[in-house]
Amino acid sequence: MPDTPAIELVRLTKCFDSVTACDCIDLDVRRGEILALLGENGSGKTTLTNMLSGIYQPDSGRILLDGKPVSIRSPRDAIRLGIGMIHQHFKLVEVLTARENILLGQSGLVSMKPEDAVRAFQISVDLDKKIYDMSVSEKQAVEILKVLCRGADKLILDEPTAVLTPQEIQALFDTLRQMRREGKAIIIITHKLEEVMEVSDRVTVLRKGVNVGTVNTSETNRFSLTERMVGKQIDLDVKRETLPPGQTLLKVQGLSAHDESGRALIEDINFDLKAGEILGVAGVAGSGQKALCETITGLEKPTSGKVFMQGRQISGLSPREIIRAGVSMAFIPEDRLGMGLVGGMDIPDNLLLKTYRDQKGFFLSRKQARAEAEGMVRRLRIVTPGIHAKIRKLSGGNVQKVLLGREINLNPKVLITAYPVRGLDIGASMTIYDMLNEQKRNGVGILFVGEDLDVLLGLCDRILVLCAGRVSAIVESQFATKALLGMKMTGLTTDKEDDYA
Amino acid sequence: MPKGWALPHIVQRGEVKPALIWAYRALAVAFALAMGGVFLAFLGYSPFNVYGTMLRGALGSAGMQKETLKLTIPLALTALGVLLAFKMRFWNIGAEGQIAAGAIAASYFAYFQSHLPSGLLLSLMAVSGFVAGGLWGLVPAWFKTRFGTNETLFTLMLNYIIFHFITYLREGPWRDPGGGFAATPRFPKQARLPELPFPFVGNLHIGWIVVLVMVIGIFIYLRYTKQGYEITVVGENERTARYAGMPVKRVILRTMFLSAGICGLAGMLQVAGPDRQLTDAVAGGRGFTAVSVVWLARLSPAGVLAVSFLFAALQKGCSMMQTEYRIPASMSDILQGIILFCVLGAEFFLQYRVMFRKKVAA
C-alpha cells in the first residue's frame, strides 16, 4: 500500500499540568517526503516529536506507523520502530568517539556500519574523533549517523539548522534530499521560512498546540505561512535606521585570547563601536565569538591587546568593574541557561543578578525587582504563570526576553548581545529587534553577534566578520551582500572581491 | 492497540502544593516505620510494643524529653551549618571535624583561661569555637577556589586529622594528671553553660536558645540578605554568578567559614554543655547524621529543627529499646536509613506522577 503514510498521528493530545501542549493533533508524513513542522515557540512542536520518539507518552490519541497502530513507550521502542530523532540538544557522550556513540548500547540494533553510512550519505565526519573535540555541525552529523545506523526510515530533526552556517545548512539539506530519494519519511522542525520553502514538500503549521493546517510548499509563500503561524501578518523586514555617527564608545585594539592549551581563540581583533550603532558580528559557529564577548566583558583575560571604554582602559578589570563602566552583556549561549540566568530562581531574583550589590546595607530588597518584573512581563509579553515562576519553566523565547530585558534595564552604554533570537519565532524575534533599535536610538552602542545573515544585513550598520578567530572584514551593511559575508566567513578570497563590495 | 489498554507511564508534575509535599513525606515516614516494624517482627519482637517503648523512651517523661532535646541541640545546630554549605552546592561532609575543631578551641579557654569571669570565659569559648571551626572549614574551601580540589573528599579527610589531634591532646599535653586512664580533665564550673528553663521540661543548657536564634537567623540570612542571595546564585549556577560580576571565590570562602563556624559552635556547646570535658566522642557521628537531616529537611531551616528532633527522638527511643529488649541500638541507624530511603524515594513521586493513557475516543 504505497499510499499509507509512514507516520500518521490521530488526535494526539498531551498536557503538562494545566497547559495543553498538543491538542488533538492530526498529522501524516509519507515515505519519500520532507514535512516541515512550523510553529512559534511553545506551539507544541517539540512535545509532538518527543511523543514520537518515546520520551513522552501521549495522554490520548493514536500513532500509526505504516498504517499500524503502535505504542512508543521508550526511545528504544522508537528506534525499533524505525524512528530516528535528531534533537536540538545533542544527546552524545562527550568523552567517547563518534563511532562509540553510534554503537553505544545498540547491540543487535545496528543495521548499517558507521563507515557505510558515512559513504552512502556523504557525511563528512571523523568517526574516531572524540565528541568534545567536535564542532556543533560535526556533533549533529554524528546524531544523524546514529539514527541512520540504527536503520531509521522515519527521521525527525528538531531545529537542525539553528546551529549551522549557510554552507553547513546546504550540506545538511543535500543529505536530507538524499534520504528523501531513498524513501525515508522526514519531519524537519524549523523557524526559518526560507528553509521551509527550500527543502520541504509540505508544511504543517502548529499554533498553540493545534494543527492549523497542512499545505503543499509549492502552493504557499512565506507571508501566508507566517500569517498562519502567528495568526496575523507580520512585517518580515528588519528595519535599519541610520543615525548620525556618535562618539566612539568601545575601542578594541589588538585583542588576542588563548585557551588553556595555548590555542588562539581570537587573534589581533581591532574595531571601534560608536554610540547609536549596531555592529554585527558574523562568523561560522566557533570562530571566536564567544571568546570575543568574554574578553571584552572581563570573564576571560586577554593574552594581549587592550579594550577602551570611552577612552578608559577596561581590559584587565573584573567583570563587575566592566559592568559598572557601562558594558553590559546579554549572552545567550548554546544552552540557554548556561550563563546569564539562574534556572531555579524566579524572574525578580534573576533581574537582581547584576544590581543587587548596588543596594545599600546587608539586606536585599526585592520590591523594585518585583515591580520591574511585572512591567517586563507586560511590556515584552512574556508568557509565564506569574513573575514568581522559575525561569527554568519558561519557554526558550521567554527566557531570552527576560535576559535581554534585564540587560536593557541596566541602561548600558554598550550592549553586547550574542544570538539573542536563537530559537525564537518571528514575532518574538521582531520584539527583540525592536528592543535593540530602541536602544540604538537612545545612543547605546550595540555589538550584535548573530547567525542569520539576512538579519545581520538588515539590522546592523556595520558587520564585522570573524574567521578562525581573526577579523576577515568589517563592512558597511548597505554595501554588503550575503555572498560577500559568506565568503569572508569561510576565509575565501577572490580577485574579484570588489565586485561584491 | 486493543481497546481498553491502559499504559502506565511517568509524567512530570508542575508546581506541587506544600501541603501535598508534607502529606507525601508523612506517608513515607509511616511506610518506613512499617518496614522497620516488619524487620522487628522478623527479629521476633512485637513492633507495637517496641515502638511503644521507643516512644516512651524518647518522650515518656519530662526527663526523657529533656534528654531528647539535649540530643537535638547539637544535631540541629550542625545541620544548620551544613545547610549553608549545601545551599551553595558545596558538599561539606566535614562537620565532624569542624565540631571537633570548635570543641578544641573552646576547651583551651576552659582549661587555661578559667580565671576569667564566667560570662566572659563562655563568650570567648563560643567565639573561639566558631572561629576555629570556621578556619578548619576554610582549608578545603581555599583549596577548592584555588586549585579546584574536590571538597567532598577534602572535608572528609580533615575529620581524621583533627580526631587524631584530640587523641594526642588527651594522651599528652591535656591529659588529666589525676585520672587513672588517659582522659582530659573536667571543665571548671565557670566554663559550663548556664541553664534556662525550657517549657514543660525544666532546665536545659542555653544551647536551645542558640539553636532557635540560629534557625531564624539562617532563614532570614538565606531569604532576605544579599549574602544569602549570592549563596543561592553560586549554588544554582556558578557560571552565571561569575558572569554577573559576583565575587564567586569570596562567596565560597565566606559561606564555608560560616558553615563550618556554626559546626564549631555546636562543638563548643557540646563540651561546655553535656560533656563538660573534651573527648573524641564530641561529634559522635552528628556531622554525618546532619547531612541526612539537611536532605530530609529539603534545605529548610525550620525543617532542620523538626527532622533533628525526630532523629534525636529516634536515637533516644532506640537506647531505651536497647535496655528493655536488648535489641542493639544500631536498630536506630537502620530505622534512620529506612526513613531516609523512603522519604527521598517519595521525592520521585513529588516530581513525577504515574499516569495511565486515556482511551481514545473513536
Image: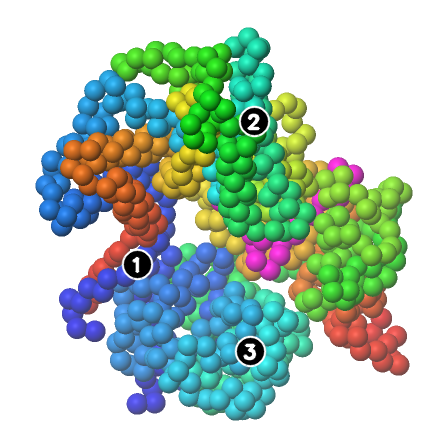
Is the residue marked by circle 1 packed among few (<14), some (14-19), or many (20+) residues within 10 Å?
A: some
Rendered image: mark on residue B105: 2
Look at mark 3 in the image and give the residue it sits on: A98
Label 1 marks a residue whose chain is B
Closer to viewer: mark 1 or mark 2: 2
Sequence-earlier tag: 1 or 2: 1
Q: Same chain for labels 3 and 1? Say yes or no.
A: no
Three-letter code for the amino acid on which mark 2 is drawn:
Ala
Residue A343 in magenta stretch: yes
Residue at left offset 53%, top offset 50%: B153
Label 3 marks a residue whose chain is A
Q: Position of residue A430 (x, y in %)?
A: 61, 54
Look at mark 1 in the image and give the residue it sits on: B10
The magenta span reads A322-347
- In the rendered image, the vertical position of residue A178 relative to residue A458, given as above or below: below
Image quarter where the C terminus of chain B lies is bottom left
Marks 3/1 in contact by CB < 8 Å: the verdict is: no
The front one of A274 and A268 is A268
| Disc 1 from disc 2: Cα separation | 53 Å
Residue at left offset 62%, top offset 47%: B144
Label 2 marks a residue whose chain is B
